[in-house]
Image (tube, helix red, strand yellow):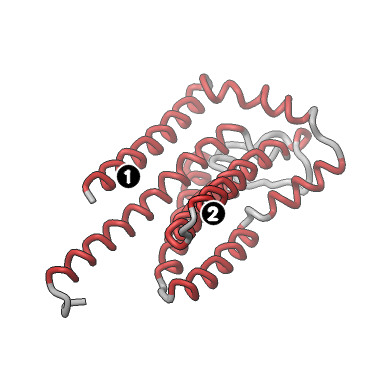
Amino acid sequence: MWITLAIGAAFVTLMTAAAAEIYESLAEKDDLAAVDRPLLALVMTWRSPVADTAVTWFTNTGSVIGMSIIALAAIAVLTRIRRSWRPLLLIGAAGAGSVAMTIAGKDLIGRARPPMADAVPPYETSPSFPSGHTLNATAIIAVIAYLWFLQLEARAARAWMIAGCAAYVFLIGCSRIYLGHHWFTDVAVAWALGLGWAALVVLSHHVFNTVRRVRREQDPKRL
C-alpha cells in the first residue's frame, strides 16, 4: 500500500508541478508559451474542408454533452458488470473535479482564445485557459480506463484498452489546437491537470479498498 501511495502521490505532485510550470511560462510568455503561435500557424496549413468537418465532429465527443454520454454509458456498463456503485462515484468525481478546475481556471486567468480569423467555426467565446474539452476528457477517460483495467484480465486487452484511451485523450487535445479553439499551452495544462486529478481519484479508491480489506481481515463481521 505504502509503495503505491508514494508512487501515486509523486505522480500527482509531478502533474501539479507541470501545470504550474506551464502557467508560469504563460505569465512570462516564454518556454512553452513561445510555441503557441508558431504551432497554430503550422496546423492552419494542414486544414481542408473534409478534415475540418471530421475534426469538428471528433472534438464534439469531448464536449460537455459528448463526455456526459460517454461517462453515463461507462457507468451503466461498469456498474452492471461490477455490481457496485463505485464506477458512478469514481467517474462522477472525475467529472465534477475536472469541470470545477475548468471553470475556476477560465474565470481566474481569463486568457483570450486564438483570433476567430484563425479558427474553424463554430466559434467559441469563453476564456481559453485551460481547455475544458481536453481536461474533462483526460480526467474522465483516465478513470474509465482504470476501472476497465481492473475488470479485464488479459494483458493484451489491457494494453489495447490503455492505448485506445491514451490516443483518444491525445487526439482530443490536438483537435482543439487544429481547430484554432485553443493554444497549445491551454491543452498541455489540461492534460497535466486531468491526469493529476484522475490519479488522485484512483489513489483514493486504492487506499479505500486497502483499508476496507485490512479491516475485513481483522474483523470479518465488521464489513
Count of numbered circles in the view: 2
Q: CA distance from mark 1 to mark 2?
A: 24 Å
| The quarter of the displayed image where residue 70 is located | bottom right
- Secondary structure at badge 2 equals helix
Question: Which label was assigned to residue 8?
Answer: 1
Q: Amino acid at mark 1?
A: Gly
Q: Are marks 1 and 2 in contact (CB under 8 Å)?
A: no
Residue 159, x across and y down, in percent: 52, 48
- Secondary structure at badge 1 equals helix
Residue denoted by label 2? 157
Farthest residue in the bottom direction? 221
**Disc nearer the start of the sequence (1/2):** 1
Residue 36, x across and y down, in percent: 62, 27
Farthest residue in the left direction? 218
Q: Is the residue 36 above or below the residue 215 in the image?
A: above
**Which residue does the image show at 56% across and 37% down from the upper left?**
186
**Which residue does the image show at 33% across and 52% down from the upper left?**
203
Pick the residue in front: 62 or 169. Answer: 169
Residue 79, x across and y down, in percent: 47, 73
Is residue 96 visible in the rendered image? The answer is: no
**Which residue does the image show at 31% across and 57% down from the upper left?**
206
Along the horizontal axis of the image, is 111 left or right of 14? right
Q: Is the residue 110 above or below the residue 147 in the image?
A: above
**Which residue does the image show at 21% across and 62% down from the upper left?**
211
Q: Is the residue 80 above or below the residue 94 in the image?
A: below
Is residue 108 visible in the rendered image? The answer is: yes
Along the horizontal axis of the image, is 56 left or right of 91? right
| The quarter of the displayed image where residue 196 is located | top left
Q: Amino acid at mark 2?
A: Ala
Residue 91, x across and y down, in percent: 46, 62
